[in-house]
Image (tube, grey):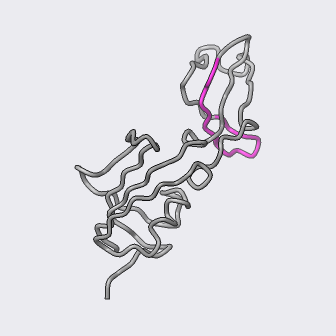
Amino acid sequence: MTQTVQADSLVTLHYRMALADDEDLITTFGGSPATLKLGNGELAPTLEHCLAGLPVGQRRVFVLEAEQAFGAHNPQLLERVPLTAFPADAPPEEMSMIEFTGPDGAKYAGLVRQVRDGAATVDFNHPLAGKAIRFEVEIVGIV
C-alpha cells in the first residue's frame, strides 16, 4: 500500500515557493530535500493542506491566490511608531525587519516600510501577504 501524507506526517520533500511571476523565493530542488513535521507550524497551514493525501514520489504544482496563501494585505497592520520608541543607538532603517515585544510578552516581527517625519511606518503583515504564490512539491518520503 502506498503511503500518503497525513496531517501529522514527518515528510521529506523537495519544495519550491515562487511568486506568481515565477520569481523564486525559496527552493530545495537541486539540493538536499527538507524534512518537516506537519502540524507543528514549520509550514503554513494552507501549504500543509496542499500536501495532504499526496503519495511518495508525487510531484505537484499548486497556484494559490493571496487569500489562500498568506492572506490579503491588511492596512490595519501598518503602524506608525515614533522614532523615540527605538533605541538611540539602533534607529530603524527602511526595508529592515525589527522584532517587537507585545504587552503579553509575545514577539512580533515588522518590516520598516518608511522612516519620515519623526516616525517609522512598520508593516506587521506577513511579507508575502497580498501575493499569489506558486508552490511546487515532490514527496520524497514519509516517516
* Residue at (34% x, 48% y) in the render: 27
Q: Residue 65 appears at what percent x and percent y?
A: 56, 51
Count up the numbered dots: 0
The verdict on residue 54 being magenta is: no
* Residue at (44% x, 76% y) in the render: 53
19 vs 76, left or right, is: left
Q: Residue 3 appears at what percent x and percent y?
A: 35, 81
Residue 123 vertical position relative to residue 74 in the rendered view, above or below: above
77 vs 23, left or right, is: right
Q: Quadrant of the N terminus?
A: bottom left
Q: Give the camera-side residue of 33 and 63.
A: 63
Residue 143 in view in this figure = no
Q: Quadrant of residue 84?
A: top right
Highlighted range, magenta = 100-114
Q: Quadrant of the C terminus?
A: bottom left
Q: Quadrant of residue 73?
A: top right
* Residue at (39% x, 78% y) in the render: 4
Residue 116 in view in this figure = yes
Give the farthest residue toward the front.
Answer: 21
* Residue at (32% x, 64% y) in the render: 59
Residue 58 vertical position relative to residue 17 in the rendered view, above or below: below
Give the farthest residue toward the bottom.
Answer: 1
Assign the magenta stretch its main secondary structure. Answer: strand
Q: Give the camera-side residue of 48 and 107.
A: 48
Q: Residue 45 appears at what percent x and percent y?
A: 55, 61
The verdict on residue 109 being magenta is: yes
